[in-house]
Image (spheres, rainbow, N blue to C red):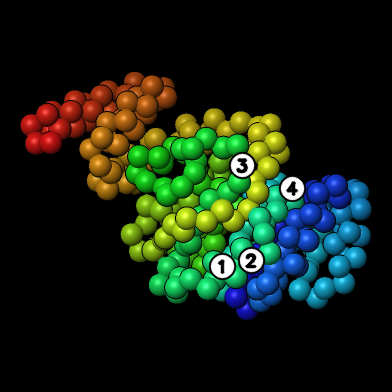
Amino acid sequence: MKLSIVIPTYNSSKVIKRALDSIVNQTMQDFEVLVMDGASTDNTGEIVASYNDDRIKFYSEPDKGIYDAMNKGIAKAQGEWLYFIGSDDWLLDNNVLQSVFSLNIDQYDVVYGDVESDLSEKNRGKWTFYTLEYNRCHQAIFYRKNIFDKIGDYTLKYKIGADHDLNLKWFLNPEIKNVFINQKIAHFSTGGFSKEQGDDGFFDDFYSNILHYHFRKLPIGVKINILEKAILRTPNKMCKFVMKFQLFIVRIYKKLFC
């Protein structure tokens, strides 16, 4: 099977049909749909069952949130590729999947495009070292399933930022090959859960994790930017002192050699 599409749901009866319609009407039909439901109390399950399509599977049980549901989808997926879409999102047109999988993507582990939304331009287009702080939507990303054996699943530590955390793991891993395609994949509804919640915990860790695991890979301008922001967010006086010293050294290096 080419593709497993994972949809986390909870009381999604008002929106799930639009999402499913955008999938079942695709010209490419080599997929399964895993609706990972968090024990909805509305008729989400009945709407899914009404499609009477063996490729659409509905699993309903209490979960620990969106990313827990997505992790359960990873475990059950049978496809070579994985794609995650929200129940209030939809694929933009009937040829999206066909257009993506007709490209020469066999050499890549992650293929990502763009979404239709009101997101900042910094959250759009090709991801770079200079835009690491601005996530790329999972609604625009296709992941080869086996990369999860290398980078792990979504961490449940972050209620909103787990997809950002996971995307950094593949983007900054030289063993995982990725490619950007200049194509809009889906409509991303920005008024959902992520809009209503915050995730300061993710950014509390973001800068220190980048410095700890990926400092050598970063262009010098990015190193300075990350260090400056890490210093502002670090409560530990010793860590702050060490980072200020690092920042001083990097600035001297830039002045002398760049």
For the point 70% across and 36% down, which residue is it? 191
The image position of residue 32, as x and y in percent, is 70, 71
The image position of residue 222, as x and y in percent, is 30, 36
Disc 3 or 4, which lies upstream in sequence? 4
Disc 4 or 2, which lies upstream in sequence? 4
Residue, disc 3: 117
Q: Quadrant of residue 228?
A: top left
Q: Residues within 10 Å of mark 4 (few under 14, many from 20)?
A: many
Q: Secondary structure at mark 3?
A: loop
Q: Quadrant of residue 25?
A: bottom right
Amino acid bearing label 1: Ser
Q: Secondary structure at mark 4?
A: loop
Residue, disc 1: 99
The image position of residue 53, as x and y in percent, is 82, 73
Amino acid bearing label 4: Asp
The residue nearer to you, when weighing 158 against 81, is 81
Disc 1 or 3, which lies upstream in sequence? 1
Residue 258 position (above or below residue 58): above
Q: Is the residue under label 3 in contact with that under label 1 (CB below 8 Å)?
A: no
Q: Is residue 49 visible?
A: yes
Q: Left or right: where does residue 200 sit relative to residue 50?
A: left
Q: Is the residue under label 4 in contact with that under label 1 (CB below 8 Å)?
A: no
Q: Residues within 10 Å of mark 3 (few under 14, many from 20)?
A: few
Q: Is the residue under label 1 in contact with that under label 2 (CB below 8 Å)?
A: yes
Disc 3 or 2, which lies upstream in sequence? 2
